[in-house]
Image (tube, rainbow, N blue to C red):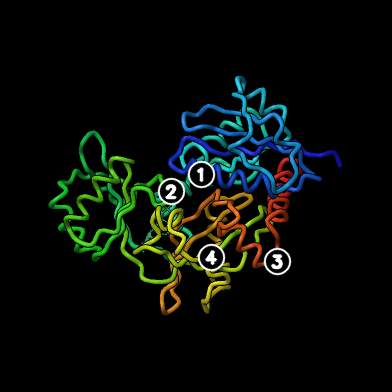
Amino acid sequence: MPKINLGIIFGGISTEHDVSVASGQAVVEHINREKYNVFPTYIDKDGKWYEYKNLETESENEVCIEVYEKYEIKNIVKYLRKLDMVFPVLHGKYGEDGSIQGMLEMFNIPYVGNKVLASSIAMDKVYTKFIIEKAGIKQAKYIYIKYENGKYKYVENDFEEQEIELNKFSKNVKKELRFPMFVKPANYGSSVGITKAKNMKQLIEAIKLAGKLDKKILIEENIVGKEIECAVIGTKEIKASCAGQIIPADDFYTYDAKYKNNKSKLVIPANIDCEEEVKEIAIKAFNAIDGHGLARVDFFVTANNEIYLNEINTMPGFTTSSMFPKLWEASGISFTEILDIIIEDSINIYTQ
Ligand SMILES: Nc1ncnc2c1ncn2[C@@H]1O[C@H](COP(=O)(O)OP(=O)(O)O)[C@@H](O)[C@H]1O
Ligand SMILES: [Mg+2]
């Protein structure tokens, strides 16, 4: 078999740029070079694209993206068309939300992983709620509000909107959800803009903060339980990994607890009695959003084994210490093998 020319795209303009660089670097390091000619491709924070001239010939495990010379790609489409396939290892806006996937579709460039629809549903925490509800999967109770043209609006189940005044609204919220509550901008990741609001004052501040980032805002009840994650792969035949548990170093899994505080722990496999059920729900949720290729599905599991779905990540973290590769390792599949399986599966979509 001839080698596959594979572009690995990382960086990007989202708040998760640095995480994506770390993920991209780990993928470049672990990819099987017997099968793939690797074309590392970097997008900077302003959206400029770069290629690395000599990096593809380097041996495994010796890659440090920062030190290699890179050259700006002037004609991105022409560059992408030289490749057999691209792997967008991008998180957040324009990378995980269906945007780059749409661009690749338009130019007929095969790519790894989730398509436009699954990417954009899973990126949007409000629309994920609607689909998960439809699938009959348990999730935290929520309230959906919007912030548009300086006004806050409550969005009802039938999408009718009612203008609200924050002080009054916050008092009413108390009738539906108890403190603490989670306030989230709909389209972010890495816990950016998320607050655990413990009282009315914090709730109002949290809504204002989320409203600065996104016009869609989600307010959720607090679920007390273990944070459990499960990885899924495949398209026609979907497989789930064992479950892992996150023990955040903070009050919840904040940005710092995720990337800065090394006291956060991953426990793999998770110590829960309902692992099989978690796996089944992970696969069901992945199907519900029309998933392709891979995802990490995140849950809360309460003391009496109630399973709440929290979110679906269509391009999970891919660093060597990330949950996704670690879950597969614990399931007997190495980082290099899991990359290979995911890429092969995506190739099959285009060749069948
Ligand atoms: N409803 C909830 N109940 C309890 N903890 C929550 C809830 N929602 C979010 N969290 C905490 O906040 C973290 C980040 O929220 P999440 O919805 O996963 O956003 P992100 O996409 O930024 O990771 C979670 O990992 C968890 O620690
Ligand atoms: Mg999360």
Please say if 150 is above or below 254.
above
Q: Earlier in the sequence, mark 3 or mark 2?
A: 2
Q: Which mark is residue 281?
A: 4
Query: Outermost residue toward the top?
Result: 74
- x, y (%) of residue 115? 58, 42
Q: Earlier in the sequence, mark 4 or mark 3?
A: 4
Q: Is mark 2 within 8 Å of ligand 1?
A: yes
Q: Earlier in the sequence, mark 1 or mark 3?
A: 1
Real-space CA distance between mark 4 and mark 1, rounded to the nearest whole angstrom: 23 Å
Q: Which mark is residue 332?
A: 3
Quarter holding the N terminus? Answer: top right
Element type at mark 1:
loop
Nearer the camera: disc 4 or disc 1: 1
Nearer the camera: disc 2 or disc 4: 2
Element type at mark 2:
loop
User: Between residues 322 and 111, which one lies in front from this camera angle?
Assistant: 322
Real-space CA distance between mark 2 and mark 4, rounded to the nearest whole angstrom: 22 Å
Badge 4: how crowded within 10 Å, few (<14), some, or many (20+)? many
